[in-house]
Amino acid sequence: MQPEPRALARFYASATGRMAARVLSERIGALWPDLSGQRLLGLGWTAPFLPLWRGRVARLCALIPAELGPAGWPEGHEHPDGAVAVGEEERLPFPDLAFDRVLVVHGLEASGSVRRMLREVWRVLADEGLALFVVPNRRGLWAHLETTPFGNGQPYSQGQLARLLARHLFAVERCDTALFCPPFPWRPLLAGAAAWDRAGRALAPALAGVVLVEARKSAFGALPAGAAAVSGRVYAAAPCSRSSA
């Protein structure tokens, strides 16, 4: 079951969603602290995280679910205005080698064709480019509760995700974990989310709510993706914005 785009927007506007965004932003920012001069694509639902690099990257593009339309980006998150293209997540509307980095959140686990999606990510990445995949952890509590978008779609263990990426011509560089705080909207619990994550990462990393895997495009994967018929969520591509720097 795929999370509905409007449900994603509602979740990240909630107290639990804001906590999740803070925790994940900290881990994503630790893995990718400086993308100055890089070309970055956000794929899936990346609105809470792209502000980490706004104004510092050479180019920033985002794909948002087309059913939300040009005004569908959640309030309070900066984004490039308008929509310039519509396509399926397994057929990205960008040329080959267009990006140095691709951030995928709420994308891989919800894809109608994982193989095609990964081939498209590989295609639009520059040679030796990096992709960061953020997915629900099969062993974590978040993947087993449908009250959050992490409880929808196909969860993965860290090892499963690493092997999947290796089969699709990516070389795994680094792995990380996040979201150890239980996904319940209790204010004292949410306030202690950072402490939960510090303790969980040290004591029980396998029980994280989310796994993060950074992978590099393999230079040996220059095989055509093929033209298999697939179906998937339809996205509108927000226009690329360039840094003033």
Image (cartoon, rainbow, N blue to C red):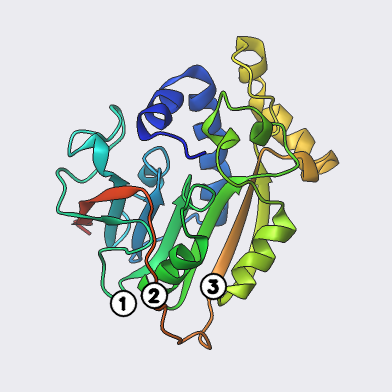
Where does the image place residue 121, in percent across and percent down from the top left? 42, 67
Q: What residue sits 34% from the left and 69% below the top?
A: 99
Residue located beneath label 3 in the image: 216
Q: Is residue 234 left or right of residue 18?
A: left
| Three-letter code for the amino acid on which mark 1 is drawn | Asp
What residue appears at the point 55 percent right and 31 percent down from the top-left corner? 20
Of the image marks 2 and 3, the number of the one nearer the N terminus? 2
Residue situated in front as seen by the camera: 219 or 60: 219
Residue at the location (37% across, 35% down)? Answer: 5
1 or 2: tag closer to the N-terminus: 1
Residue projecting furthest to the top: 187
Between the residue at mark 1 and the residue at mark 2, the CA separation in whole angstroms equals 5 Å
Q: Amino acid at mark 3?
A: Arg
Give the Cα distance between marks 1 and 3. 16 Å
Q: Which residue is mark 1?
A: 96
* C-alpha span from label 2 to label 3: 12 Å
Mark closest to the chain's N terminus, 1 or 3: 1
> As shown in the figure, which amino acid type bears the numbered disc 2?
Arg
- Name of the residue lying farthest toward the front: 229
Task: Name the residue: 52% across, 58% down.
Answer: 132
Q: Is residue 32 left or right of residue 179?
A: left
Q: Classify mark 2: residues with Cα within 10 Å, few (<14), some (14-19) or many (20+).
A: many
Residue assigned mark 2: 123
Q: Secondary structure at mark 3?
A: strand
Few, some or many residues within 10 Å of mark 1 (<14, 14–19, 20+): some
Dots 1 and 2: beta carbons under 8 Å? Answer: yes
- Residue 26 screen position, x and y as percent: 55, 41
Image quarter of the C terminus: bottom left
